[in-house]
Amino acid sequence: QVQLMESGGGLVQPGGSLRLSCVASDSSIRSHTMGWYRQIPGRQRELVAEVTSGGTEKYGESFEGRFTISRDARIHAVFLQMDSLKPEDTGVYYCRAVRRYLPRSDYWGPGTQVTVSS
């Protein structure tokens, strides 16, 4: 069972930046799409950004232009650089590694809290 562990969350003022990291426990996720999702209480998790094993990136509409996703296959990690943070970016950010073709698999990290507040 692959484990994902996030780090880098915290409290930041509006306009500030944070960098989230997610490291997988083994290299079996090299064929997976890796990404970040945000959840706010009472709402479903929404896509922040994801990157395929081939490097194709996709962003959620609310985050495109301010957030940048990157991936380091050597250490089985994915990163999220968050700039120009807004209070509405607050939430729990989850790392995900998913393979949407057979054999399918889907892994989630425990989440890290990001709070944007003055």
Image: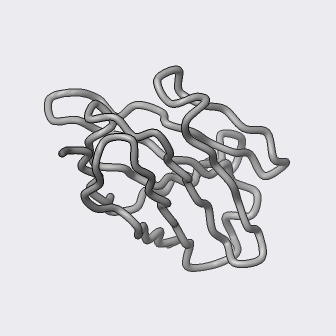
Colouring method of the image: one colour
Residue at 69% x, 70% y is 28
The percent position of residue 17, horizontal first and vertical second, equals: 45, 52
Q: Position of residue 32 (x, y in %)?
A: 69, 53
Residue drawn at (40%, 49%) of the image: 16
- Residue at 69% from the left image edge and 54% from the top image edge: 70
Q: Nearer the viewer, residue 77 or 13?
A: 13
Q: How many marks are shown on the rendered structure?
A: 0
Q: Nearer the viewer, residue 18 or 13?
A: 13
In terms of depth relative to the viewer, which is nearer, 30 or 91?
91
Left or right of 51 on screen, residue 63: left
User: Relative to 10, is 43 above or below?
Assistant: above
Along the horizontal axis of the image, is 107 left or right of 114?
right
Q: Residue furthest left?
A: 42
Tell me the quarter of the image containing the C terminus: top left
x and y percentages locating residue 23 in the rendered image? 55, 72
Q: Residue furthest toward the top?
A: 61
Quarter-of-image position of residue 26: bottom right
Residue 108 picture quarter: bottom left
Residue at figure coordinates x 58%, y 59% from the top left: 79
